Amino acid sequence: MIKFNRLKGLSVLACFFCTCQIQAQNRIAPAYPLITHNTNFSIWSNTDELNNSTTTHWTGADHSLLGMINVDGKVYRFLGKEQTNYKTILAAADEIPYDVSYTETQPDASWTSKDYKTTNWKSGQAPFGDDDKNVKTLWKSDNIWIRRNFTVKNTASINELLLKLNHDDNVEVYLNGNKIYETTGWTGSFKYLPVNKSLLKTGENTIAIHLANTAGGRYLDFGLVDKQKDATGENLVAKQTKVDITATQTTYEFTAGNIDLQLKFTSPLLLNDLKLVARPVSYITYAVKANDGKKHAVKVFLGASSDIAVYQPSQLVAAKRYDTGNLSVLKVGTVDQPVLQKGADDMRIDWGYFYVAAEKNAGAIQYITKGADAVEAFKKGVTKSSASEGRSLSLNTVIPFGSVGSNKVERFVELAYDEIYAVQYFNNNLRPWWNATGNETIEGQLISADNEYNSIMQRCSEFDKEVYATALKSGGAEYAHICVLAYRQSIAAHTLVKSPEGETLWLSKENNSGGFINTVDVTYPSAPLYLIYNPELMQGMLTGIFTFSETGKYPHPWAAHDLGTYPKANGQTYGEPMPVEESGNMIILCAAITKVQGNTDYAKKHWQTLTTWVDYLTQEGLDPKTQLCTDDFAGHLARNANLSVKAIVAIGCYAQMAEQLGEHETAKKYRAIAENMVPKWIEMADAGDHYALTFDNKNTWSQKYNLIWDKVLDLNLFPQKVYDTETKYYLTRGNKFGIPLDSRKSYTKNDWIVWTASFAPEKEQFDALIRPLYIHALETPSRVPLNDFYDSKTGIRENFKARSVVGGFYMKVLADKLHTN
């Protein structure tokens, strides 16, 4: 891996990026985006080599895409991994309901033994948990002890014994009195854990489990399975030679014997074209050619799991194949279709339908099998459907390339998801933006995507070059690299719909940090990306919050935190308000919209509400009382200097908008309020060589990332000395993966570091603050879609992944754009 310890390393790195391709063995991302339409349709590879792991949904659940290539009869795997087949020994509740004995009172020390008598224990049916909609037995205490007796007729035939376990939180598991597993933490799905099969006896057996709840939810389901041997033997594996990520595409190159394969995943999220952003279709493109100058028989296989359309793999699905226009289409969805019934953070969609489409005139052959049968069917050339209903089916597409020589031959398939209804908005079920009227069809979207394939690919290529070049000019190669990694991830954490009044709504899901919808302090950090490429989407992130207040549904004199828990936007579900935080965010972002659009239309529409919020800030913003800010994981804080900055900047923003609206006296009044607050802030926060985290403790410090808007929007409220002093101090606090968020702990937020770096007075200071974020992307042990909250010393994520806030990486680009126009 490339490490640069001196400032001059940046120019060396820029030369490197310009003169060579990144090789696959040189990691370029913590996880690689493949399909990135929205928070429901979001598939990633979490290893540097595409065929080293199963592809997953951003939550980590398997959303398997399996790719094989047949070259002259030899089969090579290049995408994902084959499905592991399990034979049930002891069924979990996702297969068959079962009863256990349990107690919530600590038993004596012998409770794990096979012969223990469960006198006074209760009987209950699994699964256990605290969500009465998804469990059979409610458990709401801190601890539970469970015993399950069962019989095994014959252990001799077991190949590999595994514990099948889904638990929340800490768990200890015993088999016949022997501890076989213990861990701290929780899972969101079943994990398969190896067990010494000699501990399982022919005849009577007992599993005993202790589960402890430490925070959040509670859940337990478990069983035993036998991992089966692959009947077809090990497959050959294609050699990956390159990987590249651009704003809209991830491209891999492989060698499979005498054939070279280029595999390209394209989600055409061109932000200046909402019709294209909304179309729920992504492409997988295959380009093959011989590498030895001879002709070779080639065909390519894609197996897409029906698990892409379920919340849990235990759900029954129905699948079919049909034709539309020039396309052969595979369709799958759950039998039950519980539309908009579930709302949670760690959730996959289980309504609507997943589609795979391919051109008939290219010879595509499509069929459906059980997931376990897909590879063997391809190897044997069997192309007849053998399943139409069940669990974990495989939607199979075979594309024959015929006899391939040294000239490249290209084909593509389309992957799509029709949610039917995307979100519920103040009790109105809203269709996706592309079908807002209900008069469109997914077949129409697939056909349009097919007809426009060549032009869309060209547009994506040109856009990708533009995004990279713009970021490179603003911040250099390292900065451009992390901006590219952020692009699709940020967009794919949103859904695009129209309100009942026809307004554009661009609603985020607060991925992996609560699951809230349209969270204001998630909108705020993500804003730069959308302000640059489509401010209509920026409006679409604020409109719902304005509606919440202006309809009287949120009766407070400050802005709401969120609109609910995704996918239901019916009103705030977060536990408490963040009055200064969210009011400041909304005012600042309205001012930013006004600046980039060059008009006051949006601010004028909501002026009365903005006035209510700014008056709250003039009263409470300078020296905030104990409350949360966007960094709520750090807990409540009184006299927060950075939160005070936000209030001051927001008041200045309001004054700026008032001036643009022609309300000169109002502008003068609020400008004076903001200006008068600044010297008070400096006096209260001054800690000598830096400014404090809180006004009452000069031995603290924090990143003052909210200052950036004073620069970007040309408010000119804070003197340059504040920026000079803070930046110099930050450079003394750096760790390997960035400067900490503040003096309390070593964790950091990389979006805020970019904002902090963007007001650094000197380019070398910017480079020094950005470099650790680039190194983090290359070296973090946390192999998940780019996480924004991690330990600045170890690089290990504290929490969060796949969040939209990384759109904030574009802050330097936004600053430069506004100051060059």
Image: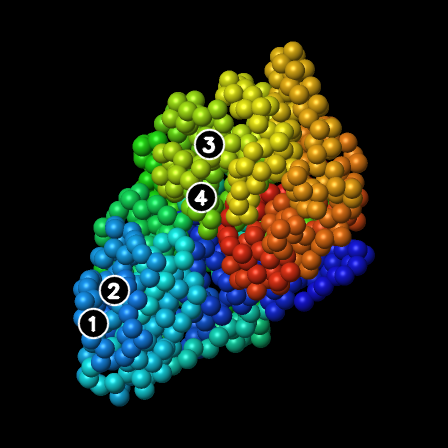
**Closer mark to the observer between disc 3 and disc 1:** 1
- Report the amino acid beneath label 3: Ala
Disc 2, disc 3: CB below 8 Å? no
Residue corresponding to mark 1: 118
Q: Are marks 4 and 1 in contact (CB under 8 Å)?
A: no
Q: Amino acid at mark 1?
A: Thr
Question: Residue under circle 4?
Answer: 509
Q: Is residue 197 above or below residue 288?
A: below
Query: Going from the N terminus, do you reach mark 4 or mark 3 first?
Result: 4
Q: Tell me the residue that label 3 is attached to.
A: 560
Instruction: Inspect this view and state whether residue 407 appears.
Output: no
Q: Earlier in the sequence, mark 1 or mark 2?
A: 2
**Mark pair 4, 3: CA separation:** 16 Å
Secondary structure of the residue carrying numbered label 2: strand
The spot of residue 199 in percent (x, y) is 31, 84
Out of 224 and 267, give the one closest to the viewer. 224
Q: What residue type is disc 2 on?
A: Thr
Which quadrant of the figure has residue 504?
A: top left
The type of residue carrying mark 4 is Lys
- Quarter that holds the C terminus: top right
